[in-house]
Amino acid sequence: MTENSSRERLVARFRKYIHFSSASNPNSDACPSSDGQMDFARHLADELRQIGLTEVTLDSNGYIMGTLPANDDGSADAPVVGFIAHMDTSPDAPAEPMEERIVQDYDGGDIVLNEEAQVILSPGEFPELIKYTGQDIMVTNGLTLLGADDKAGVCEIVSAMEYLREHPEIKHGKIRICFTPDEEIGRGADLFDVAAFGADFAYTMDGDELGGLEYENFNAANVTVRLQGRNVHPGSAKGKMINAVKLAAELQQMLPSDEYPECTEGYQGFFHVQNIRGDVEAVTMGMLIRDHDRRRFEERKELLLRIASELNEKYGAGTATAEIKDSYYNMKEKLLDKMFVVDIAREAMLRLGIEPIIKPVRGGTDGARLSFMGLPCPNIFTGGQNYHSRCEYLPLQSMEKAMEVIVEIVKGCARQTR
């Protein structure tokens, strides 16, 4: 579908975007959590106006919305479709200084990202890389992430809107877009104004491999466990010391040994100990609980509370406390009676010769929370791989296909009625 000039603009736009420093900051309570996100947001708002979008707004929290108006009177009854991506990049790996390059016509072998630091993108460690033999792949110098999560999604949406503006022969209804801050630290939907967005349904462009189409995700909870020990001199500790570090190890041994992230896949849930801080006197553990099934999700929370209770019975009241906070739920609950939204995307991919890969998200997206806020919102691939990593990469042909899927979804929506 895209001409060479469109492809070149797509890649040039993405390269411009990744040089904005927009990592979110989990240690900030502000929204957006970093100044760089607002810098990027201002650039995007100006760009949307330049390519002809209307109703472009940028609020004080960094949320950008815009409209591509309907261009066909016959589409007046078509649903308003939305496309959403997040502006921030993950704080899990350095994001700058960015030095990207394109590996032309990838030959299927190792890609040395940084010889000095011995960072190598190898199909031996990342076997899915072989799928992209013969394609052009963008990588970094192995010292930073690339930022395809989710600047590829932002780029694909902007480029698709530009393409539709330049091709008025493609008739469509009203389209709304939104770019959000702080998705990577779990706050992307916190201040999203669903009513102001005004779409009947939407798609987050925040997936990974070509063909990805996702309408199931984990139910998720964040857990803080506090373990209170008792410290005395180790020379006279017998019968007196309660070592909080040892308590942390004991707690982990009480969890199912085969239900950690490194042991699970597909629909299998897990417990994940993210961090442990402290000493003999006191330890704080940060944990995640994840499961696609709501009943099993609740059972996992109950198990952790029961373990805390058992430690209190064994070592004394107040030894263990577990604070559990639900983060998001499986959007499948809200999409089961609106599967036409998924079908529109699936059919768009098939028309483009893309085989849809429908699989559960082993994580969450803004779309999960938005679905529970009244905006049905499955997730679509952007093309990137190895997110949150120095080994992140982006097959450029996959990014181009993601842009084409947006255009095909718009065409499909023009054939729908509310």
Image (cartoon, helix red, strand yellow):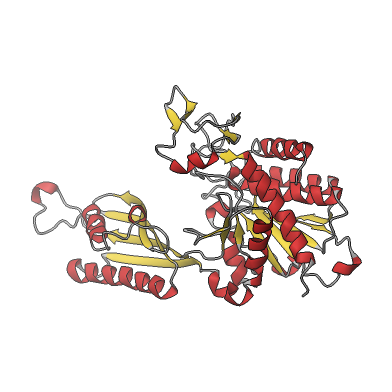
Q: Is residue 309 left or right of residue 404?
A: left
Residue lying farthest top?
Answer: 116
Tell me if residue 125 can be seen: yes
Q: In this view, does 364 lie to the left or right of 155?
A: left
Tell me if residue 375 can be seen: no
Residue lying farthest right?
Answer: 73
In-front residue for pair 352/381: 352
Q: Where residue 41 sits: x, y (%)?
A: 71, 47
In-front residue for pair 138/191: 138
Q: How many labels does the image show?
A: 0
- Which residue lies at the image location 68% right of the left edge and 59% below the top edge? 348
Q: Where residue 373 sits: x, y (%)?
A: 63, 71
Q: Where residue 82 sits: x, y (%)?
A: 72, 62
Quarter placement of the C terminus: bottom right
- Which residue lies at the image location 34% right of the left edge and 73% below the top edge? 302
Q: In this view, does 376 lie above or below 240?
A: below
Q: In this view, does 316 lie above or below 13?
A: below
Q: Is residue 120 left or right of residue 72?
A: left
Residue lying farthest bottom?
Answer: 337
Q: Where residue 351 sits: x, y (%)?
A: 69, 57
In-front residue for pair 377/414: 414
- Which residue lies at the image location 33% right of the left edge and 55% below the top edge? 263
